[in-house]
Image: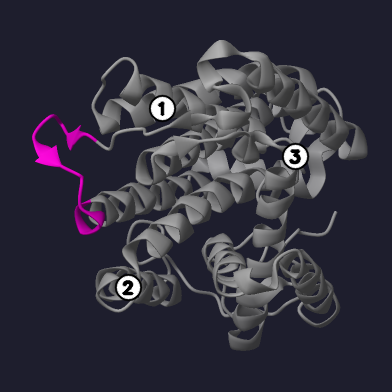
Amino acid sequence: MAAPGGFEGTDFRQERPVFMGFTSTQLIAFGVMCAVLLIAPFFLYPVFLMKVLCFALFACAFNLLIGYVGLLSFGHAAYFGMGGYLAGHAAKVWGLTPELSILIGGAVGAVLGLVIGWIAIRRQGIYFAMITLAFAQMVYFFCVQAPFTGGEDGIQSIPRGNLFGVIPLGSDMSMYWVTAVIFLLGFLFIHRAIHSPFGMVLKSVRENEPRATSLGYRTDDYKLVAFVLSAALAGVAGGLKSIVFGIATLTDVFWTMSGEVVLMSLVGGLGTIFGPVVGAAVIITMQNYLAEFGAWVTVIQGAIFVLCVLAFRRGIVGEIGNWLRVRL
């Protein structure tokens, strides 16, 4: 089975990890990303940047599943949206601090991922994708009817609160730095996971599951753990988004949100650690700056997606990595 990133047959330079699993090229790319995070809020609107970071974390979580295990989920909006709802409810009704609310969002995503993943991983290919979509729609209709979600109005006026009960997050700059730190922690966690022995097994499952099974690995267990980790991080991203914007709505749990994260990962580059970040930045930037075109934004996104599939089959970061003969 070919790697999702499209790197089969590519002659890459053999680079050894130099720090925390990063090769020298990846370490440079990570440094550039950190520098952009430090400088960007002084030139761009912090709320826009926070939206990019929330979706970048969401896309990274999704890429952990499809890019490194080869499982295409059409239901990741369930974990993202429910994480947002529970985090918002915890902050507004229970009065919890933002970090605890976000952790609750991640825990909800993990629990949902455990239940749905335990059923879904028993199937492969289109059957797996359809099962995840079906469960996500069940979660959506639950959110429509559940009293605590507010129905079509959602949960509004969610307070940002004080970090650890001490640091106020009312200002956009304060909230931005917290968002950036959470994103970086999630990014580093995913990077460490895929460069660990656990990650090596996930890649072997992606490439040839029968062979991995013949070597004695319980592949279903590995796939389930990856599914739960991906769902938990998606829940963290959803919880963070609800705290940042002070609202949790049905939009975040609808099936189109699952489609958006697929698009982000494909545009950036499947199976690359930096691809989902770039893909999320591209898609959110388009939505923000092309909003004046109304419904045509979706058409423009579709055209760009088709262009990427035809001209950049590996995605933006994947093509750059192929051109430089390095893995990004």
Q: Amino acid at mark 3?
A: Trp
Q: Looking at the image, which is closer to me, 9 or 302?
A: 302
Does 271 sit above or below residue 64? below
Q: Is residue 228 above or below residue 289?
A: above
SS for callout 3: helix
**What number is the disc on residue 87?**
1
Q: What range of the chain is rendered magenta?
A: 161-174
Instruction: Specify the quadrant that holds the C terminus.
Output: bottom right
- Amino acid on which the number 1 mark rests in the picture: Ala
The numbered dot on residue 183 is: none
Q: Quadrant of residue 264?
A: bottom right
Residue 66 horizontal side relative to residue 284, left or right: right
| Residue 255: image tag | 3
Q: Is residue 257 magenta?
A: no
Tell me if 277 is positioned left or right of 3 in this view.
Answer: left
Location of residue 246 by image quarter? top left
Q: Position of residue 148 (x, y in %)?
A: 51, 15
Amino acid under disc 2: Gly
Q: CA distance from mark 1 to mark 2?
A: 31 Å
Q: Which residue is mark 2?
A: 31
- Mark 3: few/some/many CA within 10 Å (<14, 14-19, 20+): many
